[in-house]
Amino acid sequence: MNEVANSHSVPDQPTTPEEITRRRFLEKLCIGLSGICAAILGIPLVGFVVAPIFRRTTGKWISVGKVTDYEIGKTVSVTITDPSSLPWAGITAKNALWLRRVNEGEFIAFSVNCTHLGCPVRWLQDADLFMCPCHGGVYYFDGTVAAGPPPKPLIRYEVRTANGQVQIKTMEIPITTTL
Amino acid sequence: MKRLIVGTWRWLDDRLGISALIGPSLKHLVPHDARWWYVFGSATLLAFIVQVVTGVALAFSYASSSSQAYETLEFITNQAPFGRFLRGMHYFGASAMVLMVGAHMAQTFLFGSYKFPREMDWTTGVLLLAFTLVMGFTGQLLRWDSTATWSVVVAAEQAGRVPFIGNFLAQFILGGTTIGGATLSRFFAIHVFIMPALIFLFIGIHLMLVLRHGIAEPPVAGMVVDPATYRVEYEERMRKTGRPFWPEGAWRDFVVGTGLIVIIALLAYFVGPPKLDAPPDPSNLIADPKPDWYLLWYFALLALIPPQLEGYVMILAPVIIGILLLAAPMLNNRGERAPSRRPWSIAVVLLSVIMIGSLWIVGASSPWSPNFDPPPLTEKVIGATSGPVFEGARVFQAKGCLNCHLISGDGGRRGPDLTYIGDTLSESDIIIRIVNGGVNMPAFGNSINPNELKQLTAFLQARKRPMPAGLETTHR
């Protein structure tokens, strides 16, 4: 193997100034062309992969039933379908929220995501508490933290009533950030 | 026939240069006393090969679509020939890979094998450990059941805590602002293309470095590493006492590797793959997402750290641990290698194992989580069939107290065991705790009426240790 390789080899060190200049130019040419190739492939790749970060989805008002469907003082789970989901999302386009009818015309809608790490909180009707299965976060009926590690109250959806319908403004999964 | 085969091989070997390429690697000299402690690296490699083979097979039927992945997994598990077995192999292969890479790392650390000139052997190994854990986590997500989808949310929330760019990272993980069509395919690409490519690359570099620097000998007290002389001394020792890797060093790798594959296959056949949870419906709130066993300790850590330290532990701790691991050989790359002369190295490994093991055990039971389905208290446990104590027991269950507190072995473990609370707290103490709450306990003052409070207090006051039979009679 080595003998074969050696028979094709050329001196490592260039012998003339012209040779030095030529080789340096060719080195730089190859490196530059590699950079261009990498950019041609890399820019669309990175742009495609990180595109979801910059895709802004604006909340849309959707109806979740008649006002009279909900009992005053009760908190119930409501299933919605994300109107901005991709066509192949299937079952994952569904989402849930906790909706509480406070009085005749007032509703509160909570995200189901615990503000600690996003797990789905469950409502215990008789206890008037939301409990998180993951790390033991507990919230009062108004979403304020009752116990456990959650750093802030449950996030609320915008909710309104119109034409006898309860409407929710969809939103993204609430992410608890630090800075 | 034999002549034909030999002739063909010689022709191919001449044209392809196989022997010339691989021969020196196979025949490289290894320490004569490098025996069973040295099998973990090859075992990790073999586990990875199992993952590649079974992963490729599973990919033939797996659809990385948010709407179909779950159904394809059900098909693979319940209908496809060998599907259940292959899923089991893939799961236990992942477990074996995590265990073996951990054992390999511990052995390398204890033997001081990361010291000069093998610093980069260690560093590339640390990166391979990280890649293995990423593979484990993303692999669990590809199961794409209810636990997987909620685990993606948990991962996004953790990423969200990174200062300044947290929200961007979270959206990158989710593939948008919610779970949906773009989520699963991202993890599929990461799990099937990006991470395996990185692992192949770094295994190649790792093996190249092993060949370049040789395998470190078992440490001997007093035989110190001096960068000025180590290479010459090592070469000299290898010339005198080294053995060719093939077959004198390799046979143990083959024995252990075969045993490993047999164990993985037996577990896959008899235990089977992890059961699929409910379908990935984010509106199904009856979910209890937990990571697979190899990350359960981290899950426990996030539950147990004080909330005020959480941000640091969640973000800074992995960064600091990663930097320390990567920098370990730069901090100390010479001197003694023997564990007996480096007792702190034994302490580090033992403490790590104890810490991860303890967190793992507590993570498996996760006592901080409420018990959402406690069995109702029986009349025998309540000690009454009517009256305030009986009614108080009903309040205890209705108000969610039983979700967090144990009574005679039933209930949750999030709060204190209240089986004998009547022996330690007075009536007023009990009322104050219920109304105002306490450490990690909600206040029920606004959600309990006076009658319920009275009944609940009566029930809790009645939770006393039974008196010994003789005393009970005397007392009466």
Image: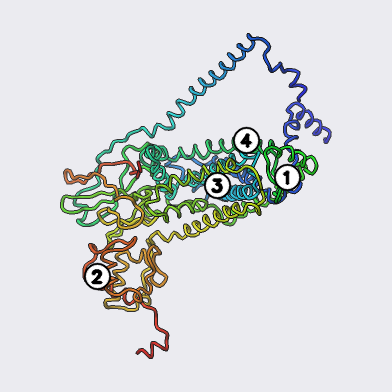
Circle 2 residues within 10 Å: few <14, some 14–19, many ≥20: some
Q: Is residue B208 left or right of residue B406?
A: right
Discs 3 and 2 lie in a common subunit: yes
Residue B188 versus residue B426 in the image, above or below: above
Q: Are marks 4 and 2 in contact (CB under 8 Å)?
A: no
Dot in front, 4 or 1: 4
Q: Quadrant of the C terminus of chain A?
A: top left
Q: Position of residue A64 (x, y in %)?
A: 25, 46
1 and 2 marks on the same chain: yes
**Disc sitting over residue B327 in the figure:** none
Q: Which residue was labeled with disc 2?
A: B452
Q: Are marks 3 and 4 in contact (CB under 8 Å)?
A: no
Compared to residue B165, the image places residue A100 above or below, namely below
Q: CA distance from mark 3 to mark 4?
A: 38 Å
- Residue, disc 3: B80
Which residue is at the front of the view, B310 or A145? Answer: B310
How far apart in space, not on screen, are marks 4 and 1 (Cα)? 20 Å
Residue B205 numbered mark, or none: 4
Residue at image coords 78%, 22%? A3
Provide the residue designation for mark 1. B250
Disc 1 residue type (three-letter): Ala
Residue type, numbered disc 2: Glu
